[in-house]
Image (spheres, helix red, strand yellow):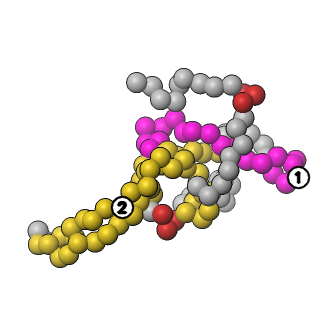
Amino acid sequence: VMVQSADDDPKTHPYWYAQVLGIFHAEVLRLDNGQVKGIQHIEFLWVRWMGAEPHYWWGRKIGRLPKIGFIVENDAFGFLDPALVICTCHLIPDFVTGWTLELLNT
């Protein structure tokens, strides 16, 4: 999925990408000073974040789409409000560059 980037720098990529790992619905208690104020239904996505490949030149002038991949930070997984999703997208795999075992160290 694609979401609008929260980065303010105009030089950064305008979108963030994520692979949806799960779609969840939950009933949660709303608390105010320890008192239950009601039950609220929430929906959220469990995602693995992806980012634009650094040092990869792309754009309309050179005729190349952005190249994205899994990020290596400790917070590569997270939760996302479905209302923030701009659209789903199909990513074309780049088999030519090979594969790695470095992204999910155990």
Viewed as shown, does residue 60 lie left or right of 40? Answer: right
Q: Which residue is mark 1?
A: 61
Task: Answer with left or right where residue 92 lies relative to residue 64.
Answer: left
Q: As drawn, is 62 to the left or to the right of 68?
A: right
Q: Secondary structure at mark 1?
A: loop
Tags 1 and 2 in contact by the CB under 8 Å rule?
A: no
Q: Earlier in the sequence, mark 1 or mark 2?
A: 2
Check disc 2 and report its element: helix, strand or loop. Answer: strand
Per the picture, the main secondary structure of the magenta-coloured stretch is: loop
Q: Quadrant of residue 14?
A: bottom right
Residue extent of the magenta highlight: 59-77
User: Residue drawn at (82%, 46%), measured in percent from left and top?
Assistant: 64
Q: Is residue 46 above or below residue 98?
A: below
- Looking at the rendered structure, the kind of residue marked 2 is His
Structural crowding at the residue carrying mark 2, measured as other residues with C-alpha within 10 Å and reported as few (<14), some (14–19) or many (≥20): few
47 above or below 85?
above
Mark 1: amino acid: Lys
Could you tell me how far apart the alpha carbons at marks 1 and 2 are, in whole angstroms? Answer: 43 Å
Q: Which mark is residue 25?
A: 2
Quadrant of the rendered structure where residue 60 is? Answer: bottom right
Query: Which of the two discs, 1 and 2, sits closer to the camera?
Result: 2
Task: Kindly identify the residue that appears in the image at 49 percent across and 68 percent down.
Answer: 83
User: Residue 23 colored magenta?
Assistant: no
Residue 17 in view in this figure: yes
